């Protein structure tokens, strides 16, 4: 049993609790809160001068692999690719990200392809193999609409947004036919691309849909709902133009990157005021850096969004509990609650302040780094 | 006549004044002081009594104006870098500045009022950059600050990647990069020192004359430790006035830099290994580098080395203060430090009587990400207000 004496603890409602205690046993949180007694014999971690938060979570990342290994720009429809096959556990990025307080993230394929393949949810543990890091049963399908597929395959059947939508629709229609034939026992040969889409059609596997522009966001919802798919919209750069619509349609968003140069026309206007506008409209969202090494600057960026109208609570929730929800791991991580994994970050001050440093990271009850 | 009532007035080169007052006339700062500073009758008053008021920020190594954003993958849109030839001392940023670029407005709104429009990094000599005032303008000549030209030289992986790697032609190695550079500089030096003036013009060599004479500054953009020391050695060998820009691995050669009193402009938050994914060599980034350079007396400015992202310059400098940089040094590295590097210290970089009225108004401490810029003045004119 480990007892963490916290200066300030962030609870599941993003309230800052003074002088709380977190109890950790067998890699799980046994108790957390202001009234928790420290049992006799418990090993005490004195974090009474620190902020203690759930381990931070990045809901749309491209770290943990070689950059060239994660964007397969040869075919717009590659549903059977798996990011699982691209994880490099010795990447220096993982260490930097972990030491910044991030304990979980998803490695997603890049956005060149309309259907890019499966991502992999990772615990950012020091590891020798991908097996020690992967959270099994959570391999969301990465899809993309907009300029990237258009640009990467101009001249082929993805030259326009019309063709992009048509190709997605054709592919899922073909997958529906394939699934019916398979269920009827009439399949003559296995097609791996189609096999990969069956759990998506069954709603067992979530789609992360890359889309920046307002029209792409709406197209994404139209397409994905036609096939009854479970999804999040990722990036949502022009979301403020349709914030009410996103809220009315109850769409879970993964918003960002914010700290980035507008690399393409569809990213013009990217600004730290975006999350605040979405919050006021009632949109539920996680916040992302869309990065690898740069994931460590996400808390600083979120803090700056707070200066531009976002509430501190929504900012903190966007990189903890809602990020976990977007990755469908909120039953395990994302808040300091009994029964959840003991993934905990320790900060010298307010985690969203740019002059604060992460001074310790615990995953599954063990410190991966600690400098206090 | 304009009077700004400030919650906190931060001149940078003098102690901050709570409840300060600043008087502006004809685009210049006329006076500044405490709450008892007389406000002339008839002066227009800006009430910033719950705000912090700073000199307009300066990025000493941006690519504002020359590299268009949003980036257009089809057309390129990077007018600040021409990789047709490796040596382009006769190229001028002044010919590539687009005063209507969207990034300029974005960055003005973050309190940045002056920037160096750097060329490259891609060639061995990318050309001559120039400082610009970020005032709303119809033509580049209204933004360019005269007599601020500096030569942009790039060492290390970039030229090797763009020429040897992409175009399969020299330079393919650091040796070839240095030979190209040394050769053209020595030829220019010979020309500069010739007893008889040259009979025929040579646009490349003539463009280098003020640099080999030590009249103007040569900036060496380099990231890896050995490239940094190579640049310092060459500059000393040829008697150049110089600065190192980028300098990601400067912490590895801090003793050398201190000994050689090398002026360094570094990225406020290092871009890190990701940027190197496309390059031949990775390099080590360390958030402590700015603080280490401050202690060695080498830090002259912090930069984003960017375009639109220049808008997070102040909070990125604040980030470095968590890793050993003092807040005062961070502030100077965004204001008076870059002003000195650009030879503009008599015009901008601090709030002092007689200087240009370039002012950034923040909700609080500009170095903290909990603050935001709410008003920007250039030459006494409000160019943006929230």
Image: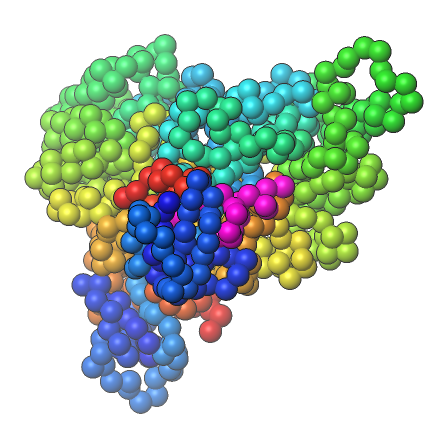
The quarter in which the N terminus of chain B is drawn is: top left
In the image, A285 versus B267, the foreground residue is B267
Q: Is residue A81 magenta?
A: no
Q: Is residue B348 magenta?
A: yes
| Residue pictured at 18% horizontal, 33% vertical | A241
In the image, A1 versus A281, the foreground residue is A281
Q: Measured from the top left, where is residue B326 in percent x and y?
A: 54, 63
Q: Measured from the top left, where is residue A223 in percent x and y?
A: 16, 26
| Residue pictured at 42% horizontal, 17% vertical | B74
Visible residue check, residue B366: no
Q: Measured from the top left, where is residue B96 in percent x and y?
A: 52, 21
Outermost residue to the right = B195
Q: How many marks?
A: 0
Visible residue check, residue B58: yes
**Image position of A169 (left or right of B360):** left
Res. A339 image quadrant: bottom left
| Residue pictured at 34% horizontal, 11% vertical | A156
| Residue pictured at 16% horizontal, 28% vertical | A218
Res. B277 image quadrant: top right
Main SS, magenta residues? loop
In the image, B26 versus A179, the foreground residue is B26
> Which segment is the magenta one?
B343-364
Q: Measured from the top left, where is residue A47 in percent x and y?
A: 38, 76
Outermost residue to the left = A248
The quarter in which the C terminus of chain B is drawn is: top left
Residue A98 in the image: above or below residue A52: above
**Image position of B244 (left or right of B187):** left
């Amino acid at each position: 049993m480990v007892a963490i004496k916290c200066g300030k603890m962030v609870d599941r409602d993003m309230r800052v609790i003074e002088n709380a205690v977190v109890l950790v046993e067998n890699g799980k949180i046994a108790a957390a809160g202001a009234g928790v007694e420290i049992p006799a014999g418990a090993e005490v971690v004195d974090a009474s001068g620190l902020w203690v938060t759930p381990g931070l979570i990045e809901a749309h990342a491209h770290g943990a692999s070689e950059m060239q290994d994660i964007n397969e720009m040869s075919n717009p429809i590659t549903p059977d690719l798996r990011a699982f096959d691209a994880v490099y556990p010795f990447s220096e990025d993982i260490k930097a990200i972990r030491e910044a307080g991030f304990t979980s993230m998803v490695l997603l394929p890049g956005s060149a392809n309309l259907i890019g393949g499966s991502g992999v949810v990772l615990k950012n543990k020091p590891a020798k193999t991908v097996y020690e890091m992967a959270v099994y049963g959570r391999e969301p399908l990465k899809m993309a609409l907009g300029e990237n597929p258009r640009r990467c395959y101009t001249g082929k059947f993805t030259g326009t947004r019309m063709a992009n939508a048509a190709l997605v629709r054709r592919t899922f229609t073909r997958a529906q036919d394939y699934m019916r034939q398979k269920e009827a026992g009439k399949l003559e040969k296995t097609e791996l691309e189609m096999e990969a889409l069956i759990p998506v059609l069954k709603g067992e596997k979530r789609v992360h849909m890359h889309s920046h522009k307002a029209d792409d966001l709406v197209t994404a919802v139209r397409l994905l709902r036609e096939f009854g798919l479970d999804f999040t919209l990722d990036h949502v750069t022009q979301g403020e133009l349709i914030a009410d619509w996103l809220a009315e349609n109850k769409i879970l968003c993964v918003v960002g990157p914010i700290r980035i140069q507008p690399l393409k026309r569809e990213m013009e206007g990217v600004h730290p005021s975006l999350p605040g506008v979405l919050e006021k409209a009632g949109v539920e969202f996680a916040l992302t850096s869309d990065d690898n090494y740069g994931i460590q600057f996400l808390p600083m960026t979120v803090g700056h969004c707070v200066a531009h109208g976002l509430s501190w609570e929504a900012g903190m929730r966007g990189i903890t509990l809602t990020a976990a929800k977007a990755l469908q791991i909120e039953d395990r991580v994302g808040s300091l609650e009994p029964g959840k994994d003991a993934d905990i970050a320790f900060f010298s001050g307010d985690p969203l302040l740019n002059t604060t440093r992460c001074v310790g990271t615990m995953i599954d009850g063990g410190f991966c780094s600690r400098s206090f | 006549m304009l009077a700004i009532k400030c919650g906190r007035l931060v001149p940078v080169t003098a102690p901050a004044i709570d409840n300060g007052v600043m008087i502006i006339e004809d685009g210049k700062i006329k006076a500044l002081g405490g709450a008892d500073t007389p406000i002339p009758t008839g002066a227009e008053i800006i009430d910033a009594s719950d705000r912090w008021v700073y000199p307009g920020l300066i990025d000493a190594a941006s690519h504002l104006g020359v590299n268009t954003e949003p980036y257009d993958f089809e057309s390129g849109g990077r007018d600040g870098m021409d990789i047709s030839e490796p040596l382009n001392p006769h190229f001028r940023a002044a010919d590539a500045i687009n005063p209507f670029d969207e990034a300029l407005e974005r960055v003005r709104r973050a309190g940045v009022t002056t920037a160096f429009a750097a060329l490259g990094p891609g060639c061995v000599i990318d050309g001559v950059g120039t400082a610009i005032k970020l005032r709303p303008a119809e033509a580049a000549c209204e933004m360019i600050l005269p007599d601020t030209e500096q030569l942009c030289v790039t060492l290390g992986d970039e030229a090797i990647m763009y020429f040897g790697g992409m175009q399969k032609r020299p330079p393919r190695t650091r040796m070839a990069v240095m030979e190209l550079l040394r050769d053209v500089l020595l030829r220019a030096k010979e020309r500069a020192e010739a007893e008889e003036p040259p009979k025929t013009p040579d646009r490349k060599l003539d463009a280098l004359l003020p640099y080999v004479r030590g009249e103007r500054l040569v900036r060496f953009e380099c990231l890896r430790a050995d490239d940094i020391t190579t640049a310092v050695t060459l500059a000393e060998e040829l008697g150049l006035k110089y600065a190192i820009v980028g300098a990601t691995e400067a912490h590895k050669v801090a003793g050398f830099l201190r000994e050689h009193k090398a002026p360094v402009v570094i990225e406020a938050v290092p871009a890190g290994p990701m940027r190197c994914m496309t390059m031949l060599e990775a390099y080590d980034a360390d958030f402590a580098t700015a603080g280490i350079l401050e202690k060695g007396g080498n830090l002259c400015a912090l930069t984003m080395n960017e375009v639109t992202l220049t808008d997070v310059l102040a909070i990125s400098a604040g980030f470095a203060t968590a890793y050993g940089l003092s807040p005062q040094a961070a502030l100077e590295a965004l204001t008076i430090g870059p002003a000195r590097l650009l030879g503009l210290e008599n015009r901008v970089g601090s709030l002092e009587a007689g200087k240009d009225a370039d002012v950034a108004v923040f909700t609080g401490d500009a170095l903290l990400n909990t603050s935001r810029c709410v008003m920007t003045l250039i030459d006494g004119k409000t160019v943006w207000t929230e």
